[in-house]
Amino acid sequence: MSHKRIFITGGSGCIGHYIVESLIQNTHHELYLLVRNPDKLKVDYKARPGVNLLNANLREIEQFSSLLQEINVAILAATAWGNLQEVFDINVIKTIKLISLLNPEVCENIIYFSTASILDQNNRLLKKAGEIGTDYIRSKYDCMYQLSRLKNIPPLTCLFPTLVLGGDEEKPYSHLSAGLPEIIKHIGLIRWLKTDGSFHFIHAADISQVVTYLVENPPQSKELQKLILGNPKVTVNQAIEEICAYLKKRIFFRFNLAPWLIEVIISVFQIKVAAWDRFCLEYRHFTYQNPINPGTFELPIYCPTVPDILRTRNILK
Protein backbone atom coordinates (compact mmCIF):
# COMPACT_ATOMS: atom_id res chain seq x y z
CA MET A 1 0.00 0.00 0.00
CA SER A 2 1.62 3.28 -1.10
CA HIS A 3 1.90 6.24 1.24
CA LYS A 4 -0.33 9.10 0.09
CA ARG A 5 -0.83 12.74 0.91
CA ILE A 6 -4.54 13.45 1.31
CA PHE A 7 -6.07 16.93 1.45
CA ILE A 8 -9.52 17.06 3.07
CA THR A 9 -12.06 19.88 3.28
CA GLY A 10 -15.24 19.74 5.33
CA GLY A 11 -13.74 17.51 8.01
CA SER A 12 -15.78 19.15 10.76
CA GLY A 13 -19.14 18.30 9.14
CA CYS A 14 -21.19 15.16 9.72
CA ILE A 15 -19.85 13.20 6.74
CA GLY A 16 -16.39 14.72 7.20
CA HIS A 17 -16.09 13.44 10.77
CA TYR A 18 -16.71 9.86 9.66
CA ILE A 19 -14.28 10.14 6.75
CA VAL A 20 -11.48 11.63 8.84
CA GLU A 21 -12.00 9.06 11.60
CA SER A 22 -11.90 6.20 9.07
CA LEU A 23 -8.72 7.46 7.40
CA ILE A 24 -7.00 7.99 10.76
CA GLN A 25 -7.95 4.55 12.06
CA ASN A 26 -7.65 2.47 8.89
CA THR A 27 -4.77 4.02 6.96
CA HIS A 28 -1.31 5.45 7.52
CA HIS A 29 -1.61 8.18 4.92
CA GLU A 30 -0.53 11.75 5.58
CA LEU A 31 -3.70 13.79 6.16
CA TYR A 32 -4.11 17.54 5.77
CA LEU A 33 -7.39 18.78 7.26
CA LEU A 34 -8.54 22.23 6.17
CA VAL A 35 -10.78 23.35 9.03
CA ARG A 36 -12.19 26.84 9.55
CA ASN A 37 -13.09 26.27 13.20
CA PRO A 38 -10.93 23.60 14.91
CA ASP A 39 -13.28 23.60 17.93
CA LYS A 40 -15.90 21.87 15.77
CA LEU A 41 -13.57 18.98 14.97
CA LYS A 42 -14.32 16.28 17.56
CA VAL A 43 -12.22 13.54 15.96
CA ASP A 44 -9.00 12.75 17.83
CA TYR A 45 -6.64 13.98 15.12
CA LYS A 46 -3.69 13.49 17.48
CA ALA A 47 -4.33 9.73 17.66
CA ARG A 48 -1.42 9.05 15.32
CA PRO A 49 1.38 10.95 13.56
CA GLY A 50 0.79 12.32 10.09
CA VAL A 51 -2.44 14.21 10.71
CA ASN A 52 -2.01 17.93 10.03
CA LEU A 53 -4.58 20.56 10.95
CA LEU A 54 -4.75 23.59 8.65
CA ASN A 55 -6.73 26.33 10.37
CA ALA A 56 -8.10 28.33 7.47
CA ASN A 57 -11.17 29.10 5.38
CA LEU A 58 -11.62 27.60 1.92
CA ARG A 59 -11.78 31.20 0.71
CA GLU A 60 -8.08 31.37 1.54
CA ILE A 61 -7.16 28.26 -0.45
CA GLU A 62 -4.49 30.05 -2.52
CA GLN A 63 -2.16 30.13 0.48
CA PHE A 64 -1.84 26.33 0.17
CA SER A 65 -0.86 26.36 -3.51
CA SER A 66 2.53 24.73 -2.91
CA LEU A 67 1.10 21.99 -0.70
CA LEU A 68 -1.68 21.21 -3.20
CA GLN A 69 0.92 20.57 -5.89
CA GLU A 70 2.12 17.58 -3.81
CA ILE A 71 -1.30 16.13 -2.92
CA ASN A 72 -2.15 12.61 -4.15
CA VAL A 73 -5.84 12.56 -3.19
CA ALA A 74 -8.21 15.48 -2.56
CA ILE A 75 -11.46 14.84 -0.67
CA LEU A 76 -13.72 17.86 -1.08
CA ALA A 77 -16.61 17.64 1.39
CA ALA A 78 -16.77 21.29 2.46
CA THR A 79 -20.01 23.08 1.77
CA ALA A 80 -21.67 26.35 2.75
CA TRP A 81 -25.30 27.08 3.63
CA GLY A 82 -27.18 30.27 4.33
CA ASN A 83 -25.50 33.45 3.09
CA LEU A 84 -25.94 33.62 -0.69
CA GLN A 85 -22.53 35.12 -1.45
CA GLU A 86 -20.71 32.62 0.78
CA VAL A 87 -22.67 29.68 -0.66
CA PHE A 88 -21.58 30.35 -4.25
CA ASP A 89 -18.11 31.51 -3.25
CA ILE A 90 -17.35 28.32 -1.27
CA ASN A 91 -19.43 25.76 -3.17
CA VAL A 92 -18.46 26.90 -6.66
CA ILE A 93 -15.66 29.45 -7.06
CA LYS A 94 -13.21 28.29 -4.39
CA THR A 95 -13.94 24.60 -4.93
CA ILE A 96 -13.02 24.94 -8.60
CA LYS A 97 -10.00 27.07 -7.66
CA LEU A 98 -8.77 24.31 -5.33
CA ILE A 99 -9.11 21.73 -8.09
CA SER A 100 -7.16 23.96 -10.48
CA LEU A 101 -4.28 24.09 -7.97
CA LEU A 102 -3.85 20.29 -7.94
CA ASN A 103 -1.11 18.77 -10.09
CA PRO A 104 -2.54 16.29 -12.66
CA GLU A 105 0.82 14.50 -12.68
CA VAL A 106 0.73 13.92 -8.90
CA CYS A 107 -2.93 13.83 -7.85
CA GLU A 108 -4.48 10.45 -8.67
CA ASN A 109 -8.04 11.18 -7.57
CA ILE A 110 -10.30 14.07 -6.63
CA ILE A 111 -13.28 12.88 -4.57
CA TYR A 112 -15.85 15.65 -4.77
CA PHE A 113 -19.11 15.70 -2.80
CA SER A 114 -22.19 17.02 -4.58
CA THR A 115 -25.81 16.08 -3.82
CA ALA A 116 -28.23 13.70 -5.50
CA SER A 117 -30.82 16.51 -5.46
CA ILE A 118 -29.30 17.95 -8.65
CA LEU A 119 -29.85 14.73 -10.63
CA ASP A 120 -32.94 13.29 -12.29
CA GLN A 121 -34.05 9.65 -12.14
CA ASN A 122 -31.62 8.79 -14.96
CA ASN A 123 -28.62 10.33 -13.13
CA ARG A 124 -28.51 13.33 -15.45
CA LEU A 125 -28.45 16.95 -14.31
CA LEU A 126 -31.95 18.00 -13.26
CA LYS A 127 -32.66 21.30 -14.98
CA LYS A 128 -35.17 22.39 -12.34
CA ALA A 129 -32.50 22.09 -9.65
CA GLY A 130 -30.46 24.75 -11.42
CA GLU A 131 -33.49 26.97 -12.02
CA ILE A 132 -35.53 26.91 -8.81
CA GLY A 133 -33.45 24.95 -6.30
CA THR A 134 -32.38 26.42 -2.99
CA ASP A 135 -29.20 28.49 -3.00
CA TYR A 136 -27.30 25.40 -1.85
CA ILE A 137 -28.77 23.17 -4.56
CA ARG A 138 -28.23 25.75 -7.30
CA SER A 139 -24.61 26.18 -6.21
CA LYS A 140 -24.04 22.42 -6.42
CA TYR A 141 -25.72 22.37 -9.84
CA ASP A 142 -23.51 25.20 -11.09
CA CYS A 143 -20.36 23.57 -9.74
CA MET A 144 -21.18 20.23 -11.34
CA TYR A 145 -21.93 21.92 -14.65
CA GLN A 146 -18.54 23.67 -14.59
CA LEU A 147 -16.63 20.61 -13.38
CA SER A 148 -17.94 18.53 -16.28
CA ARG A 149 -16.28 21.00 -18.66
CA LEU A 150 -12.87 21.38 -17.01
CA LYS A 151 -9.83 20.15 -18.91
CA ASN A 152 -6.40 19.00 -17.76
CA ILE A 153 -7.38 18.17 -14.19
CA PRO A 154 -6.71 14.99 -12.16
CA PRO A 155 -9.22 12.11 -12.36
CA LEU A 156 -12.48 13.31 -10.82
CA THR A 157 -14.92 11.14 -8.86
CA CYS A 158 -18.17 12.96 -8.08
CA LEU A 159 -20.20 11.55 -5.21
CA PHE A 160 -23.91 12.25 -4.97
CA PRO A 161 -25.23 11.34 -1.49
CA THR A 162 -28.96 10.71 -1.21
CA LEU A 163 -30.63 11.26 2.20
CA VAL A 164 -27.76 11.25 4.70
CA LEU A 165 -28.00 9.87 8.23
CA GLY A 166 -25.37 10.07 10.93
CA GLY A 167 -24.11 11.70 14.08
CA ASP A 168 -23.76 10.86 17.76
CA GLU A 169 -22.40 12.37 20.97
CA GLU A 170 -19.00 12.89 19.31
CA LYS A 171 -20.07 13.78 15.77
CA PRO A 172 -22.52 16.39 14.48
CA TYR A 173 -25.88 15.05 13.36
CA SER A 174 -26.99 15.27 9.76
CA HIS A 175 -30.12 17.34 9.18
CA LEU A 176 -32.19 14.18 8.77
CA SER A 177 -30.86 12.43 11.87
CA ALA A 178 -31.25 15.60 13.94
CA GLY A 179 -34.95 15.81 13.06
CA LEU A 180 -35.70 12.10 13.34
CA PRO A 181 -36.82 12.08 17.02
CA GLU A 182 -39.34 14.83 16.27
CA ILE A 183 -40.72 12.84 13.33
CA ILE A 184 -41.06 9.74 15.51
CA LYS A 185 -43.08 11.78 18.04
CA HIS A 186 -45.78 12.10 15.38
CA ILE A 187 -45.71 8.51 14.14
CA GLY A 188 -49.03 7.91 15.90
CA LEU A 189 -50.63 10.22 13.32
CA ILE A 190 -48.32 9.47 10.39
CA ARG A 191 -49.10 5.74 10.51
CA TRP A 192 -52.66 6.42 9.32
CA LEU A 193 -51.44 8.13 6.14
CA LYS A 194 -50.13 6.82 2.84
CA THR A 195 -48.76 8.65 -0.15
CA ASP A 196 -46.92 8.08 -3.41
CA GLY A 197 -43.18 8.65 -3.13
CA SER A 198 -39.80 6.92 -2.85
CA PHE A 199 -36.23 7.70 -1.90
CA HIS A 200 -32.78 6.33 -1.06
CA PHE A 201 -30.80 6.86 2.13
CA ILE A 202 -27.27 6.19 3.36
CA HIS A 203 -25.45 6.55 6.67
CA ALA A 204 -22.32 8.69 6.89
CA ALA A 205 -20.46 5.68 8.33
CA ASP A 206 -21.18 3.84 5.07
CA ILE A 207 -20.12 6.87 3.04
CA SER A 208 -16.79 6.88 4.88
CA GLN A 209 -16.25 3.22 3.95
CA VAL A 210 -16.84 4.01 0.29
CA VAL A 211 -14.47 6.99 0.41
CA THR A 212 -11.74 4.96 2.14
CA TYR A 213 -12.12 2.30 -0.56
CA LEU A 214 -11.84 4.94 -3.30
CA VAL A 215 -8.71 6.35 -1.68
CA GLU A 216 -7.05 2.93 -1.86
CA ASN A 217 -8.43 2.14 -5.32
CA PRO A 218 -8.06 5.22 -7.55
CA PRO A 219 -9.85 5.32 -10.92
CA GLN A 220 -8.06 3.79 -13.88
CA SER A 221 -9.60 6.24 -16.30
CA LYS A 222 -9.45 10.03 -16.48
CA GLU A 223 -13.12 10.13 -17.45
CA LEU A 224 -15.35 11.89 -14.90
CA GLN A 225 -16.95 9.28 -12.67
CA LYS A 226 -20.39 9.79 -11.10
CA LEU A 227 -21.41 7.65 -8.11
CA ILE A 228 -24.80 7.83 -6.39
CA LEU A 229 -24.46 7.01 -2.69
CA GLY A 230 -27.49 5.18 -1.32
CA ASN A 231 -29.15 1.94 -0.36
CA PRO A 232 -31.83 0.44 -2.63
CA LYS A 233 -34.91 2.66 -2.98
CA VAL A 234 -37.62 2.61 -0.32
CA THR A 235 -41.18 3.83 -0.78
CA VAL A 236 -42.63 6.28 1.72
CA ASN A 237 -45.37 3.79 2.58
CA GLN A 238 -42.84 1.00 3.10
CA ALA A 239 -40.79 3.23 5.40
CA ILE A 240 -43.85 4.07 7.52
CA GLU A 241 -44.78 0.39 7.77
CA GLU A 242 -41.28 -0.67 8.81
CA ILE A 243 -41.02 2.13 11.38
CA CYS A 244 -44.36 1.14 12.88
CA ALA A 245 -43.33 -2.52 12.98
CA TYR A 246 -40.08 -1.57 14.73
CA LEU A 247 -41.96 0.54 17.30
CA LYS A 248 -44.73 -2.09 17.62
CA LYS A 249 -47.46 0.30 16.51
CA ARG A 250 -50.26 -1.39 14.60
CA ILE A 251 -51.79 0.00 11.41
CA PHE A 252 -55.49 -0.77 10.89
CA PHE A 253 -56.22 1.44 7.88
CA ARG A 254 -54.52 4.25 5.97
CA PHE A 255 -55.85 7.45 4.47
CA ASN A 256 -54.45 8.38 1.05
CA LEU A 257 -52.68 11.74 1.18
CA ALA A 258 -53.18 12.44 -2.53
CA PRO A 259 -51.52 15.41 -4.28
CA TRP A 260 -54.87 17.20 -4.67
CA LEU A 261 -55.49 16.92 -0.94
CA ILE A 262 -52.07 18.36 -0.18
CA GLU A 263 -52.94 21.32 -2.41
CA VAL A 264 -56.19 21.81 -0.51
CA ILE A 265 -54.34 21.80 2.81
CA ILE A 266 -51.81 24.32 1.49
CA SER A 267 -54.61 26.57 0.26
CA VAL A 268 -56.87 26.35 3.32
CA PHE A 269 -54.06 26.98 5.83
CA GLN A 270 -52.36 29.52 3.52
CA ILE A 271 -49.03 27.72 3.76
CA LYS A 272 -46.20 29.44 1.91
CA VAL A 273 -44.49 26.92 -0.37
CA ALA A 274 -41.28 27.83 -2.19
CA ALA A 275 -40.95 26.88 -5.86
CA TRP A 276 -38.44 24.10 -5.10
CA ASP A 277 -40.62 22.67 -2.32
CA ARG A 278 -43.61 22.61 -4.65
CA PHE A 279 -41.53 20.85 -7.30
CA CYS A 280 -40.51 18.21 -4.73
CA LEU A 281 -44.16 17.66 -3.75
CA GLU A 282 -45.00 17.03 -7.41
CA TYR A 283 -41.84 15.06 -8.29
CA ARG A 284 -42.17 12.69 -5.28
CA HIS A 285 -39.81 9.93 -6.51
CA PHE A 286 -36.23 10.94 -5.72
CA THR A 287 -34.68 7.73 -6.97
CA TYR A 288 -31.61 7.06 -9.11
CA GLN A 289 -29.95 4.44 -11.25
CA ASN A 290 -27.36 2.05 -9.75
CA PRO A 291 -26.81 3.56 -6.29
CA ILE A 292 -23.74 2.27 -4.49
CA ASN A 293 -22.88 1.56 -0.84
CA PRO A 294 -20.15 -0.48 0.89
CA GLY A 295 -21.84 -3.69 -0.26
CA THR A 296 -20.95 -2.73 -3.84
CA PHE A 297 -17.32 -3.34 -2.89
CA GLU A 298 -18.10 -6.41 -0.76
CA LEU A 299 -17.76 -4.43 2.47
CA PRO A 300 -20.18 -4.64 5.43
CA ILE A 301 -23.02 -2.11 5.45
CA TYR A 302 -23.55 -0.29 8.75
CA CYS A 303 -27.10 0.94 8.10
CA PRO A 304 -28.85 -0.97 5.28
CA THR A 305 -32.54 -0.91 6.35
CA VAL A 306 -35.19 1.44 7.71
CA PRO A 307 -35.15 -0.21 11.19
CA ASP A 308 -31.38 0.33 11.18
CA ILE A 309 -32.04 4.05 10.75
CA LEU A 310 -33.81 4.04 14.12
CA ARG A 311 -31.30 1.70 15.73
CA THR A 312 -28.30 3.81 14.75
CA ARG A 313 -30.10 6.90 16.08
CA ASN A 314 -30.65 5.12 19.42
CA ILE A 315 -34.43 5.21 19.07
CA LEU A 316 -35.57 2.30 21.21
CA LYS A 317 -38.45 -0.05 20.49
Image (spheres, rainbow, N blue to C red):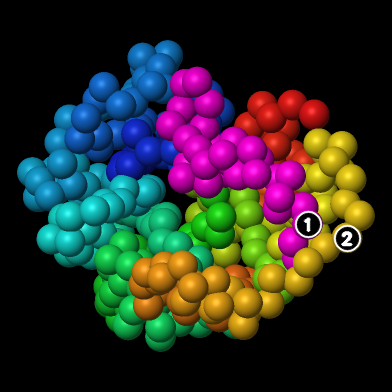
Q: Please state the horizontal and vertical placement of residue 135, each as a whole percent of the image.
A: 27, 66
Q: Please state the horizontal and vertical placement of residue 233, each as a whole percent of the image.
A: 72, 64
Quadrant into which the N terminus falls: top right
Let me know if residue 15 appears in the view. yes
Marks 1 and 2, the one that precedes in the sequence: 1
Q: Residue at x 78, y 67 (%)?
A: 255
Which residue is outermost to the front?
268
Q: Please state the horizontal and vertical placement of residue 280, each as a whole percent of the image.
A: 51, 74
Q: Which segment did they paint magenta? A: 165-194
Q: Is residue 145 magenta?
A: no
Q: Nearer the viewer, residue 75 or 305?
A: 305
Q: Is residue 77 above or below residue 11?
A: below
Identify the element where label 2 is drawn.
loop
Residue receiving disc 2: 253
Q: Nearer the viewer, residue 255 or 164?
A: 255
Q: Residue at x 24, y 34 (%)?
A: 35
Residue receiving disc 1: 192
